[in-house]
Image (cartoon, helix red, strand yellow):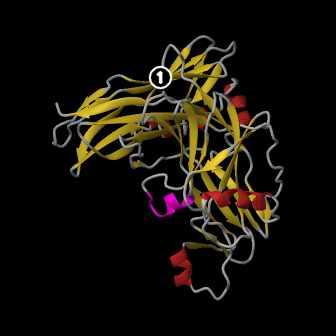
Amino acid sequence: MTSSEPNNINISKTDGIRIEINRPHPLLFPTSVYPIPQKESGVNVPIQLDVSVINDSSTPFYINLFQSFVPELVTFDRQIIQQNIVTEEIITNTQPKKSLEYSHREEVGWWQIRPESSFGFRLPAKLFWQNNSLQLKISSPANYVFGSTGLNYFWCFDDLQANTYQLRFMLTTEFQARYASKSDIITEKIARETSSKILATSWVNLRLVHPLSTDNNAIEVDGIVFKVEMQKSVLNIPARQTGTRTDVKLCIHIMNNLSTALCFYQVGSFKLTLIGEDGKEISFGSDPIKQVRDVAERQNYYLVQPKESGVFDLDGMLFWEYDQLKLAISNKYRHYFPGENTFDYFIGLNPGVSYQVQVVYYFMERGVRQLEEQVLEKVWTGWVAMPFVEFRIVEP
């Protein structure tokens, strides 16, 4: 970490092209909270980051799919966290000549963003410990676009603390596509800082919080304790018969340590992530979600008084379907009709394997004032990722 100020780059749009972070969205969720993982090998906390390139111009824009969105991480007092590129090559972006044939663009990894349209890049990150240092790794777009199974091209920040950081991404558009060794990165970085062709996203806040010393499954954020609990850590595989299942008891406890009551909504407020032993996310699908206009009238919230708690039931089941072992977790709190239970389905599970499930509880600030006027209570808003809970699937 250095005491120097971050680059004062105010350029957010060049020739009709701009870039934005859309997950987590800086306006909907100004601060996203993540738990600091335990100091154990193979334990990490995934952080989903999505960036979109938006073409507001009247001409196509070409971006190289190996392009690296350069992340910048600073503390709230504006100290820069130095990043390291942990790959042997990096390719920067340039627009090809009009004579470049489509087949050639495809060969070198070009993607066309049409006028008045956009293209999103998934930049998965992970928070983990290495050599007694808390590190954040952010992947390159190429790993997602070309289906890479590991973080082969990524940026790394180390020696992080329990703190709130600001993150943004920068993209240069005027350099020739080329390979660069690690020794070339510094030169390229200086050129990028002085370039007039730099795109920069808005800042988004990432807050890192230690789990409670008395309970590794809980974190406290601004006076509110969030805890995830799974009743059984060992789940028996059900018989391969229609209708058989193993019940899964999963719930979220929310404790209000403030002096005022708070409403915690259960509509559109939960996201689940399931991680296998290899550290990869398990694919999932969801039942369709029906909507109504006025969620406040449905009373889909808990009013939690000071020094009291509320419990969100996310129970699910383990079952077989088409020779696939599936885990279904209730998303009924995302469904707006009482009594109609729907699920998120995690597929392709295997016996004898341990999995980790993480629950994110969130409620966006947009429209909160209207809801507070309707319920006459203050509504909690934010994005909090709870610690993982581990379970194992075994033969009975």
Percent from the top left, x then y, of residue 79?
77, 37
Mark 1, Cα crowd under 10 Å, few <14 / some 14-19 / many 20+, is: some
From the viewer's side, name the closer residue of 137 and 12: 137
Give the residue displayed 23% in from the left and 44% down from the top: 320
Residue found at the very far bottom of the displayed protein: 99
Look at the image and tell me in which quarter the N terminus lies. top right
Q: Compared with residue 262, is residue 290 higher up or lower down, i.e. above or below? A: below
Percent from the top left, x then y, of residue 340?
41, 38
Mark 1 residue element: loop
Q: Compared with residue 199, is residue 299 higher up or lower down, i.e. above or below? A: above
Percent from the top left, x then y, of residue 187?
73, 60
Look at the image and tell me in which quarter the C terminus lies. top left
Give the residue displayed 61% in from the left and 57% down from the top: 182
Q: Compared with residue 102, is residue 336 higher up or lower down, i.e. above or below? A: above
- Classify residue 85 as left or right of residue 377: left
Work out whether residue 138 can be spotted. yes
Which residues make up the magenta segment? 141-148
- Classify residue 345 as left or right of residue 52: left
Name the residue beneath numbered marker 1: 217
Amino acid type, mark 1: Asn
Q: Compared with residue 31, is residue 72 higher up or lower down, i.e. above or below? A: below
Work out whether residue 338 can be spotted. no
- Classify residue 216 as left or right of residue 172: left
From the viewer's side, name the closer residue of 374 and 315: 315
The verdict on residue 91 being magenta is no
